[in-house]
Image: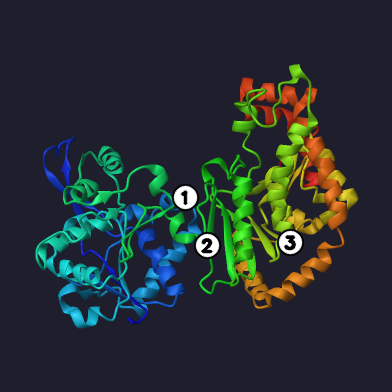
């Protein structure tokens, strides 16, 4: 039985050949900067380390690998600075501890040493187009793993390296008739348009050698292509969620775990829409919480938002500005009368999804930056503990028109009088004011937020799961019954608010002038400069 060791194949190249088709260099082959794609190496690498594997890096000439510049941009991480920092820190750690700066050369690894590895992995980026597909020493290595029926994994452009098997052994392509996933020709053509040149097509090259290429979004995104009892595995092209989740793929959620497995991270992931709630997010959130609860290693759950903020509430572009009466959920055709059961059925399902955070067997912590507004505050306040950035905002503006907080957590968190003040005005308040009011546990400067939450989560995670569950049941039991009654009433009223005369007028204004204009008109009255100062309103 081979040891728990994995060989990671990297390119020496810091560029790939691009045949220019436009501009002054049209017709010339230029060196386009590239390298390994950071997250395509870092995420699988972290998974391997978490599982207890040792890793060895190897490349054609043993040169220090270069990251693709595009993969280091914040855009590649959807603005998540902390995720990018974690992945850079992992690579720096590999430089210190695992010889990442000086990989083994392919030729220096004998067959006897190859036999000590459990599998081989090849990350993506365009760099493999330069030197991996035509390296006979790599061909020998891949043929060895193929012959031994040991896992061979590649992602994105990584499968281009399989072409090297034609240059070793008997000279045949050993992956003929294997089902393979890679960066598709269609995706490469998109890159050609961006870069103004022609790029070698991995998908076509593999297909021409007899590989069966897996095509289609449903078949590729969020999945892993596996062929034969040899467990030849081709990870979906540049599909990071499939590398970070264990049991299912989510449309609006990222699911990850800490290195020790004790903390589950659930990240709302619609950053281009301020993580606004659509038809998928409530169920994705529920399923992610249930996934963490079913995991025997998880002790604590951290919920946060990707991009500029935590959650901006329901997506008003969908449910207000572009809503169609009688077709869009929450917008009934009132010419036929109003049926409260229709709205209640839909919103009750969403409320139950958000409430999964409150009923979770394991403690839940909301890490709020930017804003938790309207339905976003519903989600945050369902967590056991809420920690905010001091300059973040929280509140429920739709309480003025077009909403009622269906999770009904306000009074249970801050008391009757202060809850009335917040819902009578629809004000947003800062994280600092929310902590002072007692609405949330703590507020800290944004640069300290992640560390503050993690310190608390690690402390909680040191407690046995059954102890955490018992303490939570005792405390939740104080409000379980009354909370269910409050949520039932709030959910009924929420449907009415969207179909009341004022609710219909708000929706019509959204459609006429855009939802931002409608929100401004709704939330502006009575909010003078003096009011904002006295009542700490930051709307």
Q: Is residue 448 above or below residue 77?
A: below
Q: Which mark is residue 366?
A: none
Q: Nearer the viewer, mark 2 or mark 1?
A: 2
Q: Residue furthest front?
A: 229
Q: Which residue is mark 3?
A: 384
Instruction: Quote the CA–CA distance across marks 2 and 1.
Output: 16 Å
* Residue 491 screen position, x and y as percent: 79, 40
Q: Which residue is mark 1?
A: 78
Q: Is residue 116 above or below residue 435?
A: below
Q: Which residue is mark 2?
A: 256
In the image, taking residue 368 as reference, residue 7 lies left or right, namely left
Q: Quadrant of residue 303?
A: bottom right
Question: Which numbered disc flags the more N-terminal residue, 3 or 1?
Answer: 1
Q: Residue at x 69, y 27 (%)?
A: 331
Instruction: Quote the CA–CA distance across marks 2 and 3.
Output: 20 Å
In the image, taking residue 4 as reference, residue 315 lies left or right, namely right
Mark yes or no: residue 524 visible.
Answer: no
């Amino acid at each position: 039985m081979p040891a728990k060791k994995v060989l990671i194949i990297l390119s020496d190249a810091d560029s790939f050949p691009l045949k220019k088709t436009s501009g002054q260099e049209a017709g010339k082959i230029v060196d386009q900067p590239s390298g390994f794609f950071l997250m395509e190496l870092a995420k699988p690498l972290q998974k391997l380390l978490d599982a207890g594997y040792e890793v060895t890096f190897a490349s054609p000439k043993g040169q220090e690998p270069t990251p693709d510049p595009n993969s280091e941009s914040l855009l590649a991480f959807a603005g998540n600075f902390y995720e990018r920092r974690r992945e850079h820190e992992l690579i720096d750690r590999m430089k210190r501890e695992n010889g990442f700066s000086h990989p083994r050369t392919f030729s220096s690894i004998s067959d006897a040493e190859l036999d000590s590895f459990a599998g081989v992995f090849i990350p993506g980026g365009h760099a493999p187009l330069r030197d991996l597909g035509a390296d006979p020493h790599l061909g020998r290595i891949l043929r060895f793993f193929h012959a031994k029926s040991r896992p061979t994994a590649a992602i994105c452009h990584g499968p281009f390296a399989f072409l090297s098997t034609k240059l070793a052994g008997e000279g045949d392509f050993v992956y003929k008739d294997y089902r393979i996933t890679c960066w598709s020709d269609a995706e490469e053509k998109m890159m050609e348009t961006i870069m103004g040149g022609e790029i070698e097509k991995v998908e076509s090259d593999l297909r021409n050698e007899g590989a069966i290429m897996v095509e289609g979004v449903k078949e590729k995104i969020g999945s892993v292509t596996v062929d034969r009892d040899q467990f030849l595995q081709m990870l979906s092209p540049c599909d990071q969620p499939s590398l970070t989740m264990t049991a299912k793929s989510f449309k609006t959620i990222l699911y990850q775990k800490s290195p020790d497995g004790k903390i589950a991270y659930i990240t709302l992931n619609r950053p281009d829409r301020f993580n606004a709630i659509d038809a998928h997010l409530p169920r994705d959130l529920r399923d992610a919480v249930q996934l963490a609860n079913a995991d025997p290693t998880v002790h604590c759950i951290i919920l946060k938002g990707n991009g500029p903020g935590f959650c901006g509430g329901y997506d008003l572009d969908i449910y207000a500005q572009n809503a169609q009466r009688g077709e869009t959920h929450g917008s009934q055709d009132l010419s036929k009368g109003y049926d409260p059961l229709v709205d209640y059925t839909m919103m009750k399902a969403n409320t139950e999804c958000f409430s999964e955070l409150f009923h979770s067997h394991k403690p839940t912590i909301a890490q709020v930056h930017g804003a938790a507004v309207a339905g976003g505050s519903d989600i945050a306040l369902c967590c056991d503990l809420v920690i905010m950035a001091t300059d973040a905002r929280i509140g429920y503006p739709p309480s003025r028109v077009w909403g009622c907080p269906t999770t009904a957590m306000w009074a249970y968190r801050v008391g009757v009088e202060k809850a009335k003040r917040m819902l009578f005005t629809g004000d947003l308040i800062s994280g600092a004011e929310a902590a002072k009011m007692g609405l949330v546990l703590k507020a800290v400067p944004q640069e300290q937020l992640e560390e503050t939450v993690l310190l608390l989560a690690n402390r909680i995670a040191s407690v046995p799961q059954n102890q955490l569950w018992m303490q939570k049941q005792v405390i939740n039991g104080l409000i379980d019954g009354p909370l269910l009654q409050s949520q039932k009433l709030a959910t009924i009223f929420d449907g009415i608010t969207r179909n009341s005369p004022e609710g219909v007028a708000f929706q019509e204004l959204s459609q006429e002038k855009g939802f931002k204009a409608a929100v401004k008109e709704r939330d502006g009255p009575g909010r003078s400069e003096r009011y904002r100062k006295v009542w700490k309103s930051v709307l």
